[in-house]
Image (spheres, rainbow, N blue to C red):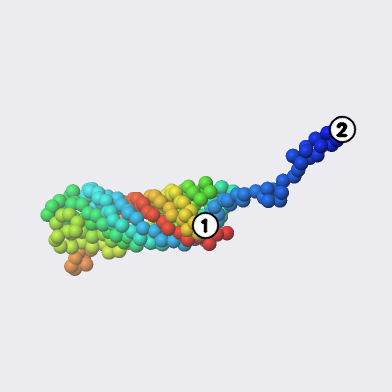
Amino acid sequence: MKYCLVAAAFAAALGAAAPASAADLIETPVAASYDWSGVYIGANGGWGSSHSCWDGVFGSEGCHNATGGSVGAQLGYRWQSNNWVLGLEAQGNWADLKGSNDSTVFPIPFFNDRSHVKWYGLLTAQVGYSFSNALVYVKGGAAVTGNHFDVYTGSAFPPPATLVGDAGDRTRWGGALGAGLEYGITPNWSLAVEYDHLFMPDKTITFTTVPGGGLFGRDKISQGVDLVGLHLNYHWNG
């Protein structure tokens, strides 16, 4: 009788310790980390402000901000190693940043200085850190702006009076620094908010008379551009 009780207890213990079924051993799969590597292409739109100061032969003529919107596109490639992300990106935007100020040397009703940023481009390298589908990054590289400068009689933009001096379209090269936060909406689509500052060197601009085409004057014009944009990207991962 004693041996039967021991055998029964041993059998019960074995039953309690019986291995789990194959279904019990299957673990719930863990979601893979977001993949930022590969080629991407996208569109962007936002707001910009170009700050310019004009210095002529007779002294400072004042400063103004040329503000407005911009739309464009970007193309880039990224490499990811663990959480670190490196990239290269080219961006081109049409812009409509306009502003003016009354000359402090020849004020109303004489001259009104006006600048217009028509487009800009960026070629930058990126360094970022990934928190799965959230990417924080900084960027830096080359920048170029397409500008138009002219002088009117009268005040306030748009000037109500006559164009008297024109410098035509001018291209200016400089540098760019920026930062952004990008979020992966799906494995192939992401949305980013980005800020960039363009450091453009001072440039002496020659103005010709309108009409006639003779020498109107020369101004050394500074330029610094601030840009805020929303970027939508499509990724070909890996």
The foreground one among 230 and 22 is 22
Q: Which mark is residue 1?
A: 2
CB atoms at circles 2 and 1 under 8 Å apart? no
Residue farthest top in this picture: 2
Q: Earlier in the sequence, mark 2 or mark 1?
A: 2
**Residue drawn 43% across and 49% down?**
180
Element on which disc 2 rests: loop
**Residue 192 seen by the camera:** yes
> Whole-percent x and y of residue 7?
84, 36
The foreground one among 14 and 125 is 14
**Residue drawn 15% across and 54% down?**
155
The kind of residue tagged 2 is Met
The foreground one among 233 and 216 is 233
> Whole-percent x and y of residue 26?
67, 50
Element on which disc 1 rests: loop
- Looking at the rendered image, the quarter that the N terminus falls into is top right
The kind of residue tagged 1 is Pro
> Whole-percent x and y of residue 166?
23, 62
Residue farthest left in this picture: 109
> Whole-percent x and y of residue 193?
41, 51
Q: Is residue 168 left or right of residue 31?
A: left
Crowd class of label 2 (few under 14; some 14 to 19; many from 20; radius 10 Å)? few
Can you identify the residue that label 1 sits on? 187
**Residue drawn 24% across and 52% down?**
56
Of tags 2 and 1, the one toward the viewer is 2
**Residue 139 seen by the camera:** no
